[in-house]
Image (cartoon, grey):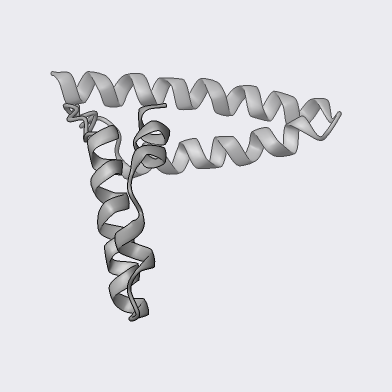
Amino acid sequence: MDFIYKLSNESWDSIFHGNDVNIMFNSFLNIYLRIFYSSFPPIRTKSRNNKSNWITLGVKTSCIRNGEVFLFCRNSNNPDLKQYYNTCCKILANIIKEAKRIAYN
């Protein structure tokens, strides 16, 4: 609301009295950006480092493969495929546990 209020109260006379389109545009842009940055100041946030050392290439590949198997399993009524998916999930869970154990020890 502050942005709209400042735009509506701005005097735009300097823009409409020019003859050169480039000068008129630059003047408009300067006024607009001044109001924009005063209404929406940049907010600094602290970024957290979420990089986990235990996520290896093998874990990433296994997760991608498990996702592909899930998509096949979701669209199928084949009980063998569902059993294969459950087996893949158990193996992936064990791989992740072992990778975390190795990384944190």
> Residue at left 83%, top 33%?
76
Instruction: Judge whether 20 appears above or below 67 on screen.
Output: below
Instruction: Judge whether 78 appears above or below 17 on screen.
Output: above
Q: Does residue 40 show up?
A: no
Residue placed furthest toward the right: 77
Q: Quadrant of residue 4?
A: top left
Residue 60 x/y as whole percent? 40, 40
> Residue at left 69%, top 37%?
71
Residue 86 x/y as whole percent? 63, 22
Quadrant of the image containing the C terminus: top left
Q: Does residue 69 show up?
A: yes
Residue 78 x/y as whole percent? 84, 30
Q: Is residue 24 left or right of residue 30?
A: right
Q: Quadrant of residue 65?
A: top right
Instruction: Judge whether 30 appears above or below 79 on screen.
Output: below
Which one is in front, 34 or 97?
34
Quadrant of the image containing the N terminus: top left
Which one is in front, 39 or 100?
39
**Number of numbered tags placed on the structure image:** 0
Residue placed furthest toward the bottom: 20
Q: Is residue 14 left or right of residue 81?
A: left
> Residue at left 20%, top 24%?
102
